[in-house]
């Protein structure tokens, strides 16, 4: 009983740490759909582990109806998960989420087909998955790593990295802990950066060609 009380307090406290709009514990407990989805999942997962699959799925579907967040009861979720807003989030059956993870609305932690076994992502501690990102397949998002808004990630992401784009590309990897302050309005653009590199190469080739022509004349 005391363990459950401690977990509930942790879930509420992490909202205050991550959301400046949170005013008091009563408001958070009654109005935050992300919190309701997490609490419902904890109950559903307890039934799932006891092989009471129908009850577990029923709780999951009821929670989905009221919160707009779909978490399969088989998913493993660690401590202090923070779901901000949350509408449209989908978390698959074999997904594993570590501690102190932040997930924004519209995120999909899904599979890539009809494969068996571990087919959903593993999200390690202190990771951040931004709005609309799709993390697909049995891949791992490393500790302290961030996935930018709208990105599609199909490969493993090392610890302390930032990934953006479709498909997702690593744009920051400095080997130190990255704070959860990802600027969603000013994301690095690996495609644009590559285009600039190509333009520079073309300009250099033109200069070399022009020099060769002058020598022949």
Image (tube, rainbow, N blue to C red):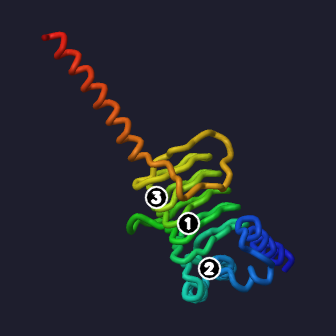
Q: Nearer the viewer, residue 28 or 201?
A: 201
Q: Where the C terminus falls, by quadrant?
A: top left
Residue 60 lies, in percent from the top left, at 58, 83
Q: Nearer the viewer, mark 2 or mark 3?
A: 3
Residue at image mark 2:
48
Q: Nearer the viewer, residue 86 or 79?
A: 86
Residue 86 lies, in percent from the top left, at 58, 74
Q: Nearer the viewer, residue 13 or 1?
A: 13
Residue located 53% across and 61% down the image: 121
Residue at image mark 3:
151
The image quadrant that residue 193 belongs to is top left
Residue at image mark 1:
95
Alpha carbon separation for disc pair 1 and 2: 14 Å
Alpha carbon separation for disc pair 3 and 1: 18 Å
Q: Residues within 10 Å of mark 1 (few under 14, many from 20)?
A: many
Using residue 67 as the reference point, say whether residue 200 is left or right of it.
left
122 up-or-down from 142: above or below: below
114 up-or-down from 194: above or below: below
Any part of residue 79 in sight? no
């Amino acid at each position: 009983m005391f363990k459950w009380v401690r977990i509930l307090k942790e879930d509420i406290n992490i909202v205050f740490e991550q959301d400046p709009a949170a005013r008091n514990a009563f408001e958070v407990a009654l109005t935050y759909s992300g919190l309701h989805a997490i609490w419902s999942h904890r109950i559903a997962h307890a039934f799932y582990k006891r092989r009471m699959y129908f009850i577990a799925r029923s709780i999951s579907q009821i929670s989905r109806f009221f919160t707009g967040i779909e978490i399969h009861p088989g998913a493993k979720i660690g401590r202090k998960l923070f779901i901000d807003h949350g509408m449209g989030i989908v978390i698959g059956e074999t997904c594993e989420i570590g501690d102190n993870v932040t997930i924004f609305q519209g995120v999909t932690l899904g599979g890539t087909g009809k494969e068996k076994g571990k087919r959903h992502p593993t999200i390690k501690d202190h990771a951040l998955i931004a709005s609309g990102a799709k993390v697909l397949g049995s891949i791992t998002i490393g500790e302290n790593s961030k996935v930018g808004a709208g990105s599609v990630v199909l490969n493993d992401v090392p610890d302390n990295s930032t990934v953006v784009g479709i498909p997702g590309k690593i744009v920051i990897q400095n080997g130190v802990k990255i704070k959860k302050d990802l600027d969603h309005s000013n994301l690095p653009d690996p495609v644009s950066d590559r285009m600039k590199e190509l333009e520079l190469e073309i300009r250099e080739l033109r200069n070399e060609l022009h020099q060769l022509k002058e020598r022949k004349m």
